[in-house]
Image: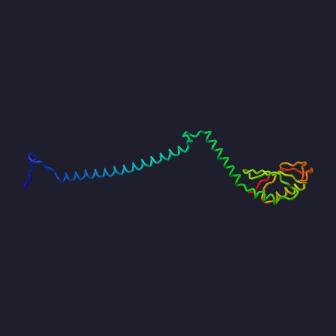
Amino acid sequence: MKPAINLSTRTYINRRALKFGILVAISALAVWLFVAGYLLVRDTSHLSDVQQKIEELNSQRAELRGQDGEQVGAETLDLRWAEVAFINQLLERDSFRWTDLLSKLEKQAFSGVAVKSIKPDFKDNSLELSGYARELSHLRKFIDNLISSEEFSEVYLLKQSQQKIKDRDGRERKAIAFELLLVQGT
């Protein structure tokens, strides 16, 4: 038997190939929809990240602006830095322990020496001390006590002169005025 197909009278459709082609087209469409959905989700999340970063940058820019919304100029910025330096200096001074210093000086002093003023230098960790001694031997002993103490690493005699001062009773007498620079030990 010879199968004969008359193509002129009957249309021939290969249904198996047609079904396979439709299945491939649907599969390709499904893969394309999956990839497009994935890319859409990825780009949407990236877009939200970019918008969030833009908002952060805008808020940081707003912080750099003045109260009236204008940008802070160099003069205003310098003024603010000066204020910060002043506040830091106040904090340094506040952290200085006067009671410790006075106790250290009290350990070295004796009855022949009177302290007139104390000027601390917070940056150099030193202080200037001025006062009066009854005699030169009292001044020497006071300086020797300061040098031999562990509290001060260096002691410098800046100035020494003989002056007339009034004592408690109002009488004038001679005394030795002095100025010392004391560097506290580390």
Q: Position of residue 25 (x, y in %)?
A: 25, 50
Q: What is the total number of numbered labels drawn onto the structure image?
A: 0
On screen, residue 8 versus residue 85, left or right, reads left
Q: Position of residue 109 (x, y in %)?
A: 84, 58
Q: Position of residue 140 (x, y in %)?
A: 87, 55
- Which image quarter holds the C terminus? bottom right
- Colour setup of the view: rainbow
- 177 and 21: which one is in front? 177
Q: Residue furthest front?
A: 169
Q: Residue at x 85, y 57 (%)?
A: 142
Q: Position of residue 69 (x, y in %)?
A: 54, 40
On screen, residue 59 versus residue 31, left or right, reads right
On screen, residue 59 versus residue 155, left or right, reads left
Q: Residue at x 70, y 55 (%)?
A: 95
Q: Residue at x 41, y 50 (%)?
A: 45
- 33 and 87: which one is in front? 87
Q: Residue at x 22, y 51 (%)?
A: 22
- 73 and 10: which one is in front? 73
Task: Determine the image quadrant of residue 155.
Answer: bottom right
- Which image quarter holds the N terminus? bottom left
